[in-house]
Image (spheres, rainbow, N blue to C red):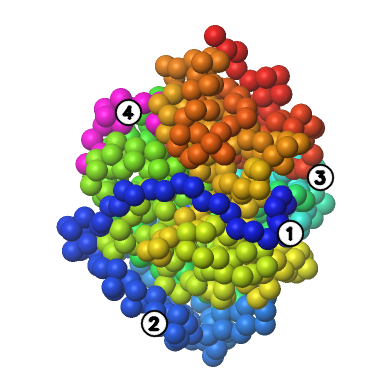
Amino acid sequence: MAPENPSGGGSIKSVLHETRVFPPPADFAKDAGIKSLDEYQALWDRAKDDPEAFWAEQAASLDWFQTWDRVLDWNPPFAQWFVGGKLNASYNCVDRHCKGPDRNKAALIFEGEPGDRRVLRYQDLLREVSKFANVLKGLGVKKGDVVALYLPMIPELVIAALACARIGAPHTVVFGGFSAEALSGRIQDCKAKVLVTADGGWRRGKVVPLKVNADGAAALCPTLKSVVVYKRTGHDVDWTPGRDHWWHELEANVSADCPAEPLDSEHPLFILYTSGSTGKPKGILHTTGGYLLQASLSTKWVFDLKPDDTYWCTADVGWVTGHSYLTYGPLAQGATCVMYEGAPNWPDEARFWKIIEDYRVSILYTAPTAIRAFMKWGEQHPKKHDLSSLRLLGSVGEPINPEAWMWYHEVIGGGRCPIVDTWWQTETGAIMISPLPGATPTIPGSATRPLPGIIPAIVTKDGVPVGENEGGFLVITRPWPSMLRTIFGDDERYKAQYWSDVPGNYFTGDGARRDEHGNYWILGRVDDVLNVAGHRLSTMEIESALVSHAAVAEAAVVGKPDEIKGQGISCFVTLESHHAPSEKLRQELRAHVAKEIGALARPDEIHFTESLPKTRSGKIMRRLLRDVAAGVESTGDTSTLEDVGVLALLRRGGQQEE
Ligand code: WTA
């Protein structure tokens, strides 16, 4: 992909300088798996010097039916890891914990939005996964057949995914908030024969009509033979006899014994669709051995997982975070995971904090977009609950603004919990850059250091490394086990998208800088970079400056064509509840950014708005805002947009001023 970057080969100017540093708390480091920066560095150096020996050593932490002959076959840009080895992801996540006392340990603690609760121990998971694997077999699903999962955030989503993995049927999870069109596009692309869905799920007290959407999608998908429907909400649904089957009816007649199939290390585990800024969604293909190894290992390292932790990753399994850090990583580690079905503000804005108090959650992993919403709702909500069980906090999905980081640290973490700001992508499969909480000093806004085995670089568009503290393109210089193997059905697009910009390197599409201490600062997607009068500015840094003003809840910054400067700076801003839009505030914000960053970053326009257009995983869709700012129609895929109404509102001029 040639980044649609306005300026030529130069570097990105980085203007945000953060000096607050938080060393790992001594009592945390004392008990941590990796206890010091020296220990981390030794591991990282060892991995750099002899990557194959390092990865082979680590891979011994999984259960293999047969060990590999070769650690890596690298035929750039196509990698195969642990060639000749055989294993099963479902076996590693379930069966192996059922051989000892952990069989009685809680694997999933589920809370539905209406307040219903279920706990599945590892041996319950084994029974349910085995039964559903037999259900799939009964529907004619064979090794290699793709199964689509379109479910609410209920245990059956994890069960179905693991059942697929058990029999070697790659799954494709489609987020339950997607429309019938988005679902059918994905089913058609991967030619799924079976779709697993539910009658509905709960979201803000209302039924999400999954079965209606599934019917709409199925009508457009000739390859689809069967639809399995889990009864969740219990409302009436349309039924197509012969095609549709109730989950509970199929399951009533199957055995609870289904041995896990020994699969090649490179057997496809799942396809997950992710949208690019242009073109149709890309089916990111992950395979078994390498993916599972890194998902599992990074969970252990980054979350410093202990046997008695209660771990809560708030991501939906429809996103990669829910795959790697709610399903495969923590379950491979034998962790106890909390899973919540619904919205964070139902029945009120304290729901998350109540869940943490009720289950004594010790590790919380969530996204900056959620943290900013919590800030906006106010600290009176977390203050109502006992959050003293928390010992570690995580963030993923976007750069976290230092302001949000500090709030997370102080209000949620009580000033005592390290924060791991984890940088990675659907394509990378697992966390790539992150603090290790017992070893790495953290700094608000920095993802800090690459994990052992990961060798990133920051380069210009021509592949030349940039200097210290200079921004550039973030690339990964060597293959890693959990890397995507290709874009499903489109090797050419895989090569063009990820391996052509900086030959020999994986191109992440993100900008970054590295400071004098070796810490990485992610500057956001490079196609979001501005070029103002010859200066390339990171939108993220201007956004952070805006958010640091007391009146601002959230900000999105985009470039707007400007005859003189090349690009002008256009800002979309939502306000904290007790502030109202006004011309006075607008001028104040412009001055504030100029003061924080410098006059060259002074916004040309500030639009006040009630909300920002976001993907369903919470990322601001800046390309749509660019179109609004430029006054042109939006083209390209909007299927990932959470609320289409937001766009219409913005085009009408956003929020009224006083
Ligand atoms: C962004 C989510 C800054 C980044 C796991 C990346 C981040 C894209 C961070 C991948 C972070 C993710 N700091 N930016 N800690 N984590 N990103 O595929 O732009 O949904 O390329 O994977 O999110 O998004 P994806």
- Mark 4 vs 2: CB contact within 8 A: no
User: Disc 3 and disc 4: Cα gap in Å?
Assistant: 47 Å
Q: Secondary structure at mark 1?
A: loop
Q: Quadrant of the N terminus?
A: bottom right
Give the residues in magenta: 371-388
Neighbourhood count class around disc 2 (C-alpha, 10 Å): few under 14, some 14–19, many 20 upward: some
Write down the residue under mark 3: 220
Task: Residue 456 in the image: state x and y as whole percent.
Answer: 52, 69
Write down the residue under mark 4: 379
Instruction: Identify the residue at horizontal 47%, vertical 69% (top origin).
Output: 294
Q: Judge whether residue 374 is colored magenta.
A: yes
User: Disc 4 and disc 2: Cα gap in Å?
Assistant: 44 Å
The amino acid beneath tag 1 is Ala
Identify the mark nearer the N-term, 3 or 4.
3
Identify the mark nearer the N-term, 1 or 3.
1
Instruction: Identify the residue at horizontal 44%, vertical 42% (top origin).
Output: 401
Residue 607 visible in rendering: yes
Q: Is residue 275 above or below residue 575?
A: below
The residue nearer to you, when weighing 355 against 558, is 558
Instruction: Identify the residue at horizontal 44%, vertical 66% (top origin).
Output: 450
Identify the mark nearer the N-term, 1 or 4.
1
Numbered disc in front, either 1 or 3: 1
The residue nearer to you, when weighing 435 against 115, is 435
Write down the residue under mark 1: 2
Q: Secondary structure at mark 4?
A: loop
Task: Residue 601 in the image: state x and y as whole percent.
Answer: 56, 38
